[in-house]
Image (cartoon, rainbow, N blue to C red):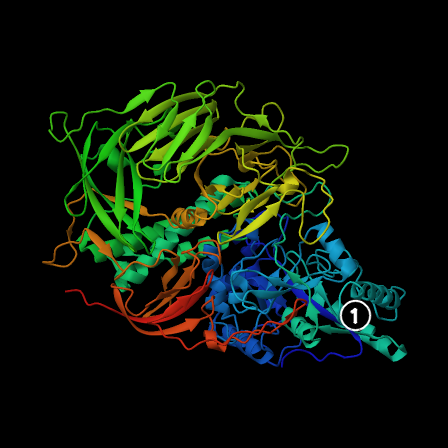
């Protein structure tokens, strides 16, 4: 209804005014918002300029808006909104309501994401401010008002999660696709298509109309009228500078040429770019003239009609054309903007921040769950006011395409980390309040944030303390706890007062060097802790004297030439001559596979005769396809640590690269804990470090990676499904994003490697797979950031990164049963909270709880509790996810039914409403446009009536609910 009229027999050119404002890149978020920092991008102070861009001076009489404007990054809009008085808010609300979104058309999230580094589990946080401030979706009234059905911007992503159709979107417009892909599509007139984002969900559930924009997201050449541009303005006065004829003729030529690459009589032109519309008048004054003079040519026979528009209005016209569209089932990775220019480096760039972002989302999930379970007591409790919104917004901002990607300047990366750290502090108060309320004990809770380098002052000095393990998963877990201590032996008691086996091992030399003088602990206490579904268990730890009869004999062995390690499920063999891993055996399945694993580096290209392109924060370009071994000799230094709970082989590849190959008792996988850095660059070469696995599997150039932690995509070396690839980079051109796992397989066996953060990965030759774990570069790649990816770290000597890879060997038919559950356990890992013990009672006269589960019964193993968080007063947001794809598991891939009403014990569900994935619109109110693929029409299925006692999930399906709840009254 709000879209401008078009002319059926003309070529309709939709001018879409928009800006793209990085939520941090060359400057921090706040510097961009207020206009501070370097003059590189003034940014105008987004806090001041949003009113200018909307052309709404305060106090202006509100009339139906004439000028649309697209704004992708709602994080800035939310900040601006909070600063406005009620009169300004009322003005903007009226404009949005009267124009049905013609003034502001958001991209659907706090930031514009780059999908290669984002896990699908963070999508809910990534739309945080937009959902609450904008309202978004199809008519839900947020603080700003109602916004029309969105066709979201995807100006920078090269990839997409399958969840986008479930958000209620009708279409997606992308700016960046591979230059060869784009050229082929232009020739075939397939710049617009149907993207089937899942093979598990029945069509058209996961179908999303996708359009490739003609100029990335920039205006046509010669038609940029921002104050940052230098193109001549339209001069239509009586002046010797009058250029109307040449401007109009050039525009008509561009429009006609663009129309030859698209299928309908409607084309789109994006009128704006990075940081544009600080002075909106420049843009709109010139576009007004352009529209008037181009349309005036119709009197002389021109068949071109120009109009202001939005992505939604353009999408509507494409739908009205009633065409069938080509179908795409793969993704858009890897992306290159020219020969030798593959954007596959950012899959790994800033690996420490990538891990911090993943940990922060993990803790945010825990914080939100505990806030939901404890209710108001979590926000106002004995430890002060708890607030999850600080971390929620910081995690949302971290999804920005120049944040978790690692493509920002160093001081901006530091600021992203600072925002996350501030969010952790607020959430830790909330977690303490919630645990006190749920356990009934006001302990002096301690959060040790540096356990990965064995630093925790409480456990290092106390003779007695408690360990509370919170499990955010909907099924019980057993988790290895590892704490720095100085005692020789300890007694560990479970919640029922029963002893738990424990061991004390020496802290490795790798860790001692890494932590420096930040800890005096010489040993680590190990024990296996179990926690119930969506709940916690509290363990008591006491240091024992040497004379204590409970003190076990110290029998941890340290051997210099290990040949194997083994537990109930796995045996790992090592070459006694070289110290390298050489074979993995699955004892349960009687499977044996030769596996050689080691570390290498690619020297980073600085440009050559073929191309001046250097490797940088965005671009991966090695100067040779053959990597260099990190170890200068064939033999690596190794020793074995072995006891009843753990067996470890410590490998030292060089002074800056080491690894622990670990088997915990009872675990059906091999853990590789790697420590890399500072990467040496004194030889003048930047380096890209990989962990490579070589096997005898016959893989036929194929390997498999996950898409945003959810579905699995087949990759083929030197191949693209939709065009004939001319490969210019045999290594970088075969790298893909690995958000959670990569695997290779033959007809019988599968080797899977799980990651603890997003990394780049590939299979460069048959039977191999590799993951890039770290990179340090000396040259910029000329993509705008303007500085090399050096990362000096805290000591200014170079960043040291530690991480984990989990390796699974199984049959092809059983592999998903393991890697699906284990990947989810890595993504939403249990969390330890410590206390000295002896806290007072929370409720007078009531005993404390040492074990608690918020579920009456655990969830089925193929169902994941994706979201549990407070929404409005007395309302919780709940998402359930079927975490298996169709056909990948005999049992896991079956539909599953859950009783919501009798699921939770922490509260009673009074009523349930099913929502879109974004939780901004009732599911029954969604009415997506139906498109016809070239393969034939698919009828949308009607939304069945909700029975909350029987909620069925199909493979890969996510269902979202708003539940009105009532909490139990204490006592």
Q: Residues within 10 Å of mark 1 (few under 14, many from 20)?
A: many
Task: Say left or right for 388 vs 155.
Answer: left
Q: Report x, y in % for residue 14.
A: 72, 70
Measuring 60% from the left and 36% from the top, which residue is drawn there? 766
Task: Say left or right for 686 vs 755.
Answer: right
| Quadrant of the image occupied by residue 338 | top right
| Quadrant of the image occupied by residue 244 | bottom right
| Quadrant of the image occupied by residue 272 | bottom right
Task: Say left or right for 963 vs 591.
Answer: left
Image: 154 above or below 26:
below
Question: In this view of the protein, which residue sits in the foreground, 440 or 336?
Answer: 336
Task: Say left or right for 436 vs 753.
Answer: left
Under tag 1, what secondary structure? Answer: helix
Q: Report x, y in % for residue 75.
A: 51, 60
Whether residue 378 is visible to the viewer of this picture, yes or no, is yes
Whether residue 141 is visible to the viewer of this picture, yes or no, is no
Looking at the figure, which quarter contains the C terminus? bottom left
Looking at the figure, which quarter contains the N terminus? bottom right
Image: 267 above or below 834:
below
Question: In this view of the protein, which residue sits in the foreground, 16 or 84?
Answer: 16
Q: Report x, y in % for residue 306.
A: 76, 73
Measuring 55% from the left and 65% from the top, which residue is drawn there? 206
Give the number of marks.
1
Residue occupied by mark 1:
290
Q: Report x, y in % for residue 585.
A: 41, 34
Question: In this view of the protein, which residue sits in the foreground, 216 or 164?
Answer: 164
Question: In this view of the protein, which residue sits in the foreground, 84 or 103?
Answer: 103
Image: 296 above or below 213:
below
Measuring 18% from the left and 25% from the top, which residue is drawn there? 553
């Amino acid at each position: 209804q709000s879209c401008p009229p078009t002319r059926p027999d003309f070529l309709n050119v939709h001018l879409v005014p928009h800006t793209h404002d990085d939520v941090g890149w060359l400057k921090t978020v706040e510097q961009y918002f207020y206009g501070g920092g370097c003059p590189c991008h003034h940014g105008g102070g987004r806090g001041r300029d949003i009113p200018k861009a909307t052309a709404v001076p305060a106090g202006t009489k509100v009339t139906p808006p004439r000028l649309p404007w697209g704004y992708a990054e709602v994080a800035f809009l939310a900040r601006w909104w909070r600063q406005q008085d009620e009169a300004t808010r009322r003005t903007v609300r009226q404009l949005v309501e009267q124009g049905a979104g013609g003034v502001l058309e958001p991209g659907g999230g706090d930031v514009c994401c780059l999908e290669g580094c984002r896990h699908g589990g963070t999508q809910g946080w990534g739309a945080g401010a937009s959902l609450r401030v904008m309202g978004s979706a199809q008519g839900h009234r947020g603080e700003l008002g109602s916004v029309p059905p969105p066709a979201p911007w995807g100006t920078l992503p090269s990839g997409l999660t399958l969840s986008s159709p479930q958000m209620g979107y009708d279409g997606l417009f992308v700016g960046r696709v591979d230059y060869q892909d784009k050229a082929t599509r232009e020739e075939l007139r397939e710049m617009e298509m149907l993207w089937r984002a899942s093979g598990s969900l029945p069509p058209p559930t996961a179908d999303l109309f996708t359009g490739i924009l003609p100029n990335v997201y920039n205006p046509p050449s010669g038609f940029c009228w921002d104050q940052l541009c230098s193109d001549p303005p339209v001069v239509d006065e009586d002046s010797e500078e009058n250029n109307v004829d040449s401007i109009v003729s050039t525009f008509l030529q561009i429009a006609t040429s663009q129309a030859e690459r698209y299928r309908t009589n409607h084309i789109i032109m994006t009128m704006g770019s990075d940081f544009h519309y600080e002075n909106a008048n420049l843009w709109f004054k010139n576009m007004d003239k352009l529209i008037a003079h181009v349309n005036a040519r119709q009197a002389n026979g021109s068949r071109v009609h120009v109009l202001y528009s939005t992505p939604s209005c353009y999408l509507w016209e494409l739908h009205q054309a009633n065409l069938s569209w080509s179908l795409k089932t793969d993704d858009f990775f890897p992306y290159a903007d020219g020969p030798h220019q593959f954007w596959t480096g950012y899959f790994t760039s800033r690996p420490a921040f990538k891990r911090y972002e993943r940990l922060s989302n993990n803790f945010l999930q825990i914080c939100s769950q505990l806030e939901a379970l404890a209710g108001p007591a979590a926000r106002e409790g004995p430890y002060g006011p708890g607030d999850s919104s600080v971390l929620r917004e910081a995690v949302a901002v971290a999804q920005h395409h120049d944040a978790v990607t690692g493509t920002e300047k160093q001081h901006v990366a530091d600021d992203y980390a600072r925002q996350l750290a501030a969010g952790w502090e607020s959430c830790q108060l909330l977690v303490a309040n919630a645990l006190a309320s749920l356990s009934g004990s006001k302990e002096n809770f301690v959060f040790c944030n540096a356990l990965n380098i064995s630093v925790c002052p409480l456990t290092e000095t106390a003779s007695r303390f408690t360990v509370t393990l919170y499990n955010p998963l909907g099924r019980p877990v057993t988790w290895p706890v590892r704490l720095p201590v100085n005692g020789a032996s300890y007694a560990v008691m479970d919640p029922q007062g029963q002893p738990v086996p424990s061991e004390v091992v020496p802290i490795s030399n790798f860790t001692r060097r890494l932590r420096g003088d930040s800890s005096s602990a010489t040993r680590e206490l190990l024990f296996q802790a179990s926690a119930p579904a969506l709940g916690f268990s509290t363990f008591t730890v006491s240091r024992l004297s040497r004379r204590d009869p409970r003190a076990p004999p110290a029998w941890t062995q340290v051997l210099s030439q290990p040949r194997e390690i083994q537990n109930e499920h796995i045996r790992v063999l090592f070459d006694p001559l070289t110290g390298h891993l050489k074979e993995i055996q699955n004892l349960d399945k009687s499977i044996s596979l030769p596996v050689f694993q080691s570390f290498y580096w690619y020297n980073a290209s600085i440009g050559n005769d073929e191309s001046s392109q250097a490797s940088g924060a965005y671009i991966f370009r090695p100067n040779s396809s053959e990597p260099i071994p990190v170890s200068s000799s064939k033999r690596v230094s190794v020793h074995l640590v072995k006891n009843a709970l753990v067996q470890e082989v410590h490998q030292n590849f060089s002074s800056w690269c080491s690894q622990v190959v670990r088997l915990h008792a009872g675990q059906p996988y091999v853990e590789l804990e790697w420590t890399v850095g500072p990467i040496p660059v004194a030889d003048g070469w930047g380096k890209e470090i990989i962990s490579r696995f070589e096997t005898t599997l016959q893989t036929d150039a194929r390997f498999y990676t996950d898409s945003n932690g959810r579905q699995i995509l087949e990759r083929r070396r030197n191949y693209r499904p939709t065009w004939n690839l001319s490969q210019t980079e045999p290594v970088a051109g075969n790298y893909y994003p690995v958000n959670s796992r990569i695997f290779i397989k033959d007809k019988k066996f599968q080797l899977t490697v799980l990651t603890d953060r997003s990394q780049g990965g590939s299979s460069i030759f048959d039977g191999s797979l590799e993951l890039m774990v770290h990179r340090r570069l000396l040259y910029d790649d000329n993509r705008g950031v303007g500085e090399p990816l050096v990362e000096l770290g805290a000591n200014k000597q170079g960043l040291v990164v530690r991480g984990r890879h989990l390796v699974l060997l199984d049959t092809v038919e059983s592999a998903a049963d393991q890697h699906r559950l284990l990947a989810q356990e890595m993504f939403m890992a249990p969390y330890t909270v410590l206390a000295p013990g002896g806290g007072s009672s929370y409720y007078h006269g009531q005993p404390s709880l040492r074990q608690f589960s918020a579920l009456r019964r655990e969830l089925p193993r193929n169902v994941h509790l994706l979201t549990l968080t407070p929404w409005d007063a007395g309302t919780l947001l709940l998402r359930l996810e079927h975490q298996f794809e169709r056909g990948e598991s005999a049992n896991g891939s079956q539909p599953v039914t859950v009783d919501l009403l009798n699921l939770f014990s922490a509260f009673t569900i009074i009523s349930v409403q099913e929502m879109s994935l974004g939780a901004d619109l009732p599911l029954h109110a969604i009415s997506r446009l139906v498109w016809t693929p070239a393969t034939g029409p698919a009828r949308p299925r009607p939304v069945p009536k909700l029975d909350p006692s029987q909620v069925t999930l199909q493979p890969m399906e996510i269902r979202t609910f708003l539940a009105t709840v009532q909490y139990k009254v204490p006592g």
